[in-house]
Image: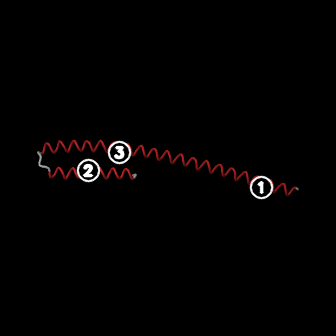
Amino acid sequence: MSKSGNFIAGILTGALAGTVLALLYAPDTGKNTRDRLSYRLSSYRDELIDLIEQLREEKEHLISEAKDKGDKVVQSAKQKADDLIKEAENLLESIDNVKEG
């Protein structure tokens, strides 16, 4: 999980813990407390769904970026290998010319 994901998860965990403690010490009726708890849990659920979606998008972006970089490295390696082969062929041709000459 990324640093931003850990940070947001920490915030959500802290908010949930604070909510539970506040509800335990709140002088309110059970129905009101349950209603507020239900509302807050629904809100946290929505935030968590948004966080999961953001993390999925970030993951896809990172995968795409890694693939692009990997393709560039492979292309560069192929070009260098082709250049080395050409140099070796030229050197071999030079050696053959010296032997014949």
> Residue 38, how many percent across, how many down?
21, 43
| Residue carrying label 2 | 15
Q: Earlier in the sequence, mark 3 or mark 2?
A: 2
- Residue underneath mark 3: 51
Q: Secondary structure at mark 2?
A: helix
Determine which quarter of the picture holds residue 30: top left
- Categorize mark 1 by other alpha carbons within 10 Å: few (<14), some (14-19), many (20+): few
What is the CA distance from the residue labelled 3 to the residue labelled 2? Answer: 15 Å
Q: Position of residue 24 (x, y in %)?
A: 16, 52
Q: Which mark is residue 45?
A: none
In the drawing, does residue 54 fall left or right of residue 17? right
Residue type, label 3: Leu
Q: Nearer the viewer, mark 1 or mark 2?
A: 2
Residue at 12% from the left image edge and 46% from the top image edge: 28
If you read the primary sequence from the N terminus, does the residue marked by circle 1 or circle 3 appear first? 3
**Identity of the residue drawn at 71% across and 52% down:** 85
Q: Which mark is residue 91?
A: 1
Give the residue drawn at x 11%, y 49%.
27
Residue at figure coordinates x 14%, y 50% from the top left: 26
Q: Tell me, yes or no, whether the two marked residues, 1 and 2, touch with CB atoms within 8 Å.
A: no
Give the left or right position of residue 80, taking residue 25 as reference.
Answer: right
Q: Which amino acid type is shown beneath numbered disc 2?
A: Ala
